[in-house]
Image (spheres, coloured by chain):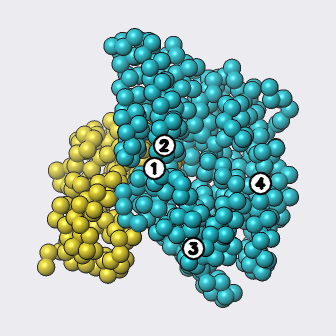
Chain colours: A cyan, B yellow
């Protein structure tokens, strides 16, 4: 059991205005690349998009690749239901993201960066382009040859998956590739590429300015640093909050719940639904393996109070996955559809309650055989909802 | 030359004729024409020296690349979980009632089209909708009527 000793701790790094970014960039670009990689690795920063891959290792692997051309891509295809933090970063502190991209380019040996901005956030582009222009001008002045382009998406959730993102940028359907090979050797246009989430990049700014220790001192073992949480649903204070990792879900609910919280969806539609009886035992952060006790999240925290029907919630998620599945692999294309038909049939009484067990088996198959994270993670929300709220699924 | 051909040529000049420029070109055509016709897709293929099937494949993947002619103002109401919980259907009904169109339809004067879309990323200010690239949040039937009446004057 995880000892319940942790309290909710606010942090304030991401949105803190840093007027001296030019000086920080100057200083950072004069440090040896190996030193920067070591700094990032010792901070134990993990990818903030949700997958949690160690950022320092990603940069290191890409830096070591012999590719003649390399790319830095900022993943701003923020599409997970319940997530809206990246937009806020890009509109409030875009220079931190650009600065981090420039440092990454220096470390791995790249001259070209891209921001893959979801079509739903197109309204951000004009302002962001202005900031990019000023930034590029400054890079030129200090002799750092690096330019950044915005690439606009067109309404496809799956393009947040890094290899689907490459396909999309290459003018193709956004269908994920097989991995390996990984982006660190075979990314955009087949070249070594770093893809980092917007928030991950903003954290590297903090690390390069204040040092790895400042970041590492926040959070708990395996889950260092702070993280932005997008809080929505049945809460009196929806919004974006920067909190240290490692908090217990109970503390989170005490702070953000409306006094009647029945369940919290951690990690969006592709994450887990945690029922009230497990708030105490659940912490938010990364663990070596998904034990269900420590849950990772890209920041999406959706609260549901007891007025909500979990059947409707699952129905909404499955409709989402059905529409957003790219359709190239059968387990996901057919699986999402059959799960959706299945729960409807059980609810109508056309199928017996035991049919839910068949559907749970189907999610296991999808977890094992789907090509990418989308099809694999449908099992997370499906099983956590059906197992904890079975009575609500049945006619 | 056909105006669409002109548009496609200009877009290709602006973005480049490499396949990596296909999405921006498709987006440019949709922005002007409000949809991608078969004619446009074949023209893009010709201009970029791609097979028409490749262009069609890409063009049909993305939900923001329309294949039916949309109105000047395309309304997309978010239907994902938080917006749904916070009264999305009431917003839809208010729009349908005011514009006299159903989901997927366009007003007879070609001014408005109504669609639903997946998570817009405004869950903390649900329900939300886009009209073209503009975002409107914390909608109520009253506020949506107010917003639409502004557009009706345009």
Q: Secondary structure at mark 2?
A: helix
- The mark closer to the camera, 1 or 3, is 3
Q: Which residue is mark 3?
A: A67
For residue A158, the mark is: 1
x, y percent for residue A82: 55, 42
Q: CA distance from mark 4 to mark 1?
A: 27 Å
**Mark 2 and mark 1 in contact (Cβ < 8 Å)?**
yes
Sequence order check, earlier mark of 1 and 3: 3
x, y percent for residue A170: 41, 66
Q: Residue at x 77, y 71 (%)?
A: A34
Q: Which residue is mark 4?
A: A44
- The mark closer to the camera, 3 or 2, is 3
The chain identifier of the residue carrying mark 4 reads: A
Q: CA distance from mark 4 to mark 2?
A: 26 Å
Which image quadrant for residue A230? top right
Sequence order check, earlier mark of 4 and 1: 4
Q: Which residue is mark 2?
A: A374
Relative side of B12 to B80, left or right? left
Q: Residue at x 52, y 69 (%)?
A: A191
Q: Residues within 10 Å of mark 4 (few under 14, many from 20)?
A: many
Sequence order check, earlier mark of 1 and 2: 1
């Amino acid at each position: 059991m995880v000892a319940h000793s942790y309290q909710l701790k606010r942090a304030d790094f991401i949105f803190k205005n840093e007027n001296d970014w030019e000086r920080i960039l100057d200083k950072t670009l004069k440090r040896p690349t190996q030193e920067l990689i070591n700094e990032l690795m010792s901070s134990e920063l993990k990818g903030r998009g949700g997958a949690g891959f160690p950022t320092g290792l990603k940069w290191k692997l890409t830096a070591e690749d012999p590719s003649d051309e390399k790319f830095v891509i900022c993943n701003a295809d923020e599409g997970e239901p319940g997530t809206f933090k990246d937009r806020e970063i890009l509109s409030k502190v875009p220079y931190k993201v650009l600065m981090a991209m420039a440092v990454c380019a220096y470390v791995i040996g790249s001259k070209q960066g891209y921001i893959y901005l979801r079509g739903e956030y197109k309204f951000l582009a004009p302002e962001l382009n202005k900031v990019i222009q000023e930034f590029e001008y400054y890079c030129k002045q200090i002799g750092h040859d690096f330019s950044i382009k915005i690439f606009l998406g067109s309404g496809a959730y799956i393009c947040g998956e890094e290899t689907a993102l490459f396909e999309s940028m290459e003018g193709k359907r956004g269908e994920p590739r097989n991995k390996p090979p990984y982006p660190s050797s075979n990314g955009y246009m087949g070249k070594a590429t770093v893809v980092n989430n917007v928030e991950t990049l903003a954290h590297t700014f903090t690390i390069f300015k204040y040092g790895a220790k400042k970041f590492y001192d926040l959070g708990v073992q395996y889950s260092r640093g702070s993280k932005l949480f997008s809080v929505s649903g049945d809460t009196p204070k929806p919004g974006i909050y920067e909190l240290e990792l490692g908090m217990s879900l109970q503390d989170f609910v005490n702070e953000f719940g409306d006094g009647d919280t029945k369940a919290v969806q951690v990690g969006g539609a592709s994450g887990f639904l945690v029922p009230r009886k497990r708030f105490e035992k659940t912490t938010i952060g990364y663990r070596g393996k998904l034990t269900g006790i420590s849950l990772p999240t890209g920041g999406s925290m959706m609260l549901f109070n007891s007025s909500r029907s979990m059947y409707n919630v699952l129905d909404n998620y499955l409709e989402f996955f059905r529409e957003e599945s790219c359709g190239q692999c059968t387990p996901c294309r057919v699986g999402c559809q059959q799960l959706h038909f299945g729960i409807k049939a059980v609810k109508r009484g056309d199928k017996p309650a035991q049919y839910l067990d068949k559907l749970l088996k189907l999610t296991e198959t999808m977890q094992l055989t789907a090509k990418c994270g989308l099809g694999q993670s449908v099992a997370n929300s499906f099983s956590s909802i059906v197992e904890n709220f079975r009575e609500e699924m049945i006619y | 030359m056909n105006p669409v051909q002109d548009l496609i040529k200009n877009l290709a000049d602006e973005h480049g004729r490499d396949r990596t420029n296909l999405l921006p070109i498709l987006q440019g055509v949709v922005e002007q024409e409000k949809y991608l016709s078969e004619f446009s897709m074949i023209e893009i293929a010709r201009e970029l020296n791609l097979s028409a099937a490749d262009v069609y494949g890409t063009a049909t993947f993305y939900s923001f690349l329309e294949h039916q002619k949309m109105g000047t103002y395309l309304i997309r109401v978010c239907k994902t979980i938080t917006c749904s919980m916070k009264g999305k259907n009431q917003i839809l009904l208010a729009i349908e009632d005011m514009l006299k169109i159903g989901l997927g339809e366009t007003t007879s004067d070609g001014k408005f089209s109504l669609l639903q879309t997946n998570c817009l990323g405004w869950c903390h200010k649900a329900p939300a909708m886009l009209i073209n690239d503009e975002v409107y949040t914390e909608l109520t039937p009253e506020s949506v009527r107010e917003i639409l009446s502004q557009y009706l004057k345009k």
